[in-house]
Amino acid sequence: MAFEFKFPDVGEGITEGTIVKWKVKQGDKVNSDQILAEVETDKAIVEIPSPKKGTILKLNHKEGDTINVGEVLAVIGEKGEKVSKKALKKEDKKPYTGSVVGFLEEAPEEEEVSKLKKADAKAGKSIIAAPKARKLAKELNVSLENISGTGPGGRITEDDVKKSSSGKPAAKVTKKYDLFGYVDRVPLKGIRKITAQKMREAVSNAALVTHHDHVDVTALSDLRKIEKEKAAKKGVHLTYLPFILRATIKSLKKHPFVASSVEGDEIIIKKYYNIGVAIDTPDGLIVPVVKGADQKKLYDLANEINTYVEKVKKRKIDLMDLKGGVFTITNIGVIGSTYFTPIVNYPETCILGTGRIEKKVAVRDDKIVIRKIMPISFTYDHRVLDGAEAARFMNDLRNILEKPESLVK
């Protein structure tokens, strides 16, 4: 019998993904673990492997479609086999959920239906409907109570909702203009959708304040120039970021509350140093995390960051590379900007932003000199840090960066 391969939960908190590219087409023969599709989820493009050997009988979605966890991605079976609604084998009630992050348990369809029935029973109803069908019914002002579902177990599908709406498929009117002129509508999905959710979560759950300062990085610039030449001989591209990362860790160790999160009535102080590095992409920021950064030397940090940059460009980064951070560094200086107010990478409570390094007139020992100055912006959760502690953290960070010799040891 045909096997319905459902889109698996490919990482913690993932509920949906967007099909970027199909690697197979209907009628193709596939082997077990052969890549079927590339799906964009939670800031990464994940390759979805086939759970078994067989022939692709049906692809249930097109490239660009959004698919929810648990929805059928593809139907696999024997060549010429007829696809039916009951294609899932009895012994395969728990669908394959292998992915780049391992194997995860997924509730069988019967269990999902049972849960939905119990939830609706509490409300005095017996309605089983997919999330998309519920959303469509709300948009069309259609009562689910009056619809007989044609899906498995009597589940109401989107087609059922459309047919019940005046007996014709519903048409959603989307205007290409507003009161003042024509507009373009861009779907909020993928990275930008996840980022939007995270930013809203941060703003809603934290009392955010941003502290601005500047650092004289003249000595750091000279040191980097020397180390850059040495690093190049070893095939390492050395930017300012590894220096800043090491300086940040030294300051974090003096101010442990900076590397924390809030859970209920407790502040959880992290005693490890996994530092996130925000990387710009055409679709938005992706933040891979350098694990155990305090244990790594300058060149090793540079290599790891450069590797992440290449992975992010190709959108081949592992989901686990994006998890476990305690503090994030984001750099808009590379784009040519100076001060800004970065938003914390929730549930982290603090983030450091660095701006463009510029030559500035300064006074040193009562003499006017030209120095290289870097603006820095530190956003923190005021529930965890007060202004004085934030200033002390920034003072220590500035002092380390202005006397950078210890950063290469």
Image (cartoon, rainbow, N blue to C red):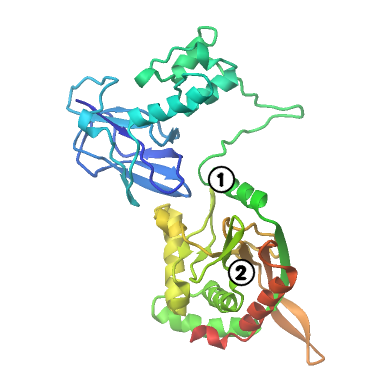
Q: If you read the primary sequence from the N terminus, does the residue marked by circle 1 or circle 2 appear first?
A: 1
Give percent across and percent down for residue 26. 27, 29
Res. 213 visible in picture: yes
**Residue visible at 69% across and 78% down?**
395
Q: CA distance from mark 1 to mark 2?
A: 27 Å
Res. 317 visible in picture: no
Left/right of residue 72 with respect to residue 361 in the rendered view: left
Q: Amino acid at mark 1?
A: Arg
The residue at the far right in this view is: 366
Q: Relative to 32, does residue 91 appear above or below in the rendering?
A: above
Quadrant housing residue 73:
top left
Q: Quadrant of the N terminus?
A: top left
Pointers 1 and 2 in contact (C-beta within 8 Å): no
Q: Residues within 10 Å of mark 1 (few under 14, many from 20)?
A: some
Left/right of residue 399 with respect to residue 49 in the rendered view: right
Q: Which residue is mark 2?
A: 258
Q: Which residue is mark 1?
A: 192
**Residue visible at 50% across and 62% down?**
325
Q: Amino acid at mark 2?
A: Val
Q: Nearer the viewer, mark 1 or mark 2?
A: 2
**Residue visible at 47% across and 20% down?**
127
Give percent across and percent down for residue 379. 67, 63
